[in-house]
Image (tube, rainbow, N blue to C red):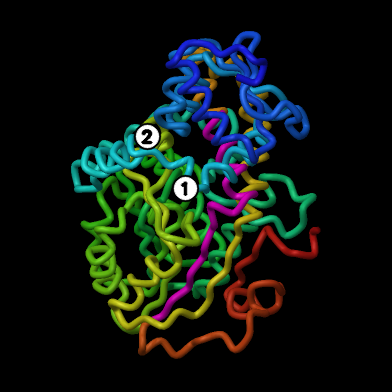
Amino acid sequence: MSNGDSGSPIERLLSGKIERLVEQSPIRVRMGDKELGRRDGAGGCGIVVRDRGTLARMALDPEIGFGDGYIEGRIEVEGDLVHFLEEATRLMQSDRARSWYNRLFKQWLRFAQANTRSGSAKNIHHHYDLSNDFYKLWLDRRMVYTCAYFPAPSATLEEAQEAKLELVCRKLQLQPGENVVEAGCGWGSLALHMAKHYGVTVRAFNISREQIEFARTQAKMEGLAGQVEFIEDDYRNIAGRFDAFVSVGMLEHVGHENYRELAGVIRNAIGDAGRGLLHFIGRNRPQPFSAWIRKHIFPGAYAPTLREALEICERNNYAVVDVENLRLHYAKTLEHWLERYERAVDRVTEMFGPEFVRMWRLYLAGSIAGFRVGTLQLFQVVFAGAERREIPWTRAHLYTREGAWADAGEAGLESEWSPARY
């Protein structure tokens, strides 16, 4: 060990594995009075391991061993948690950090959390039906739980989420009187925004009961129940013909093995004359989602590469009209969420206990790290059928009020958001 103590054979074995993993990284690992790896960790970045069993779990699988140890309070992070996780995320990209146990565990999760109709319901309920009161503690007032869009870094979370809803509508070029179907509608913010500001009718599908009940209540409060129908059902049961299809933050819950079926659902919904938008967390190269996050936070999750997601368009012979990566916007969104979450920690502790608090803190901080480092991306893809003729000549309609509201203005509709506000 780094202090010269030879230790027991098992301790030497475990510490040697950890040392080899961290020797090129500014991460310190300390257990008792023994320090493993580098002592000159940048910015005080390091961890304290409480017992040898936790160290053994880290040696077996760094990701799950660390994550579970942190939840249980057996691991403490010295210094800024997000900064530490950025360094750890870079380190975990190396082949040395991948264990046979992690690969085996991910295969088991893939089977146990398969996104079948019954499996999807179970996976979604695990996360989204925790409690509306919990999410109200740290989301914006509209309860938007997807990447915001910051027209300027100084925008508030509320302004940025409003801007994201507006950006999605502009990309879809919605027109008054059109019919829109939304797959995975969350707490209903986008559906309500589309109906209120663009004069469309919306059928929104979701299998989270708490989210659907909240969305229905909001629709009634805003006088939009006649324009927006919130349906508690699986996206695979979408029926009818629509002008536009939109999915924001659902593709991650579909599973790559189900993209063929999703492509069929979209084709049946919009045919060759419609258009659509997919907004999703993605990857630069194919790889399983974090085993720790799938175990504790998002069972059944998979973040596709852009190529994998575009298979949905290719199967339908849809033209890809626009692609944008909002990776840094999601990092900033998560920074707002984590700050609000920390302010509400006492209440979260009352609701769920200290281990839950640490679990969600690690999830939010780790997600910030992933988007900052670039292991996670956030893609928005706009596509259109072969018979769709209204293709934008430029992207001006996304960023200028005049371009976005030429048609809506004639119908007497207004937007609460404009880039000029920033």
Question: Which residue does the numbered mark 2 point to in the structure image?
Answer: 210
The quarter of the picture where the N terminus appears is top right
Give yes or no for residue 366 being in the magenta stretch: yes
Q: Secondary structure at mark 2?
A: helix
Looking at the rendering, the stretch of residues picked out in magenta corresponds to: 362-384
| Disc 2 to disc 1, C-alpha distance | 41 Å
- Seen in the picture, residue 7 relative to 146 is either above or below; the reply is above
CA neighbours of label 2 inside 10 A, class few (<14), some (14 to 19), many (20+): some
The x, y position of residue 100, in whole percent, is: 33, 39
Q: Secondary structure at mark 1?
A: helix
Q: Nearer the viewer, mark 2 or mark 1?
A: 1
Q: Residue at x 66, y 32 (%)?
A: 27
- Seen in the picture, residue 205 relative to 56 is either above or below; the reply is below
In the shown orientation, is residue 272 left or right of residue 162? Answer: left
First along the sequence among labels 2 and 1:
1
The x, y position of residue 97, in whole percent, is: 48, 40
Determine which quarter of the picture holds residue 2: top right
In the shown orientation, is residue 169 left or right of residue 98? Answer: right
- Seen from the viewer's position, the closer of residues 10 and 167 is 10
Q: Residue at x 50, y 26 (%)?
A: 66
User: Are the two marked residues, 2 and 1, in contact with CB atoms closer than 8 angstroms?
Assistant: no
Question: Which residue does the numbered mark 1 point to in the structure image?
Answer: 95
Q: Mark 1 belongs to which amino acid?
A: Asp
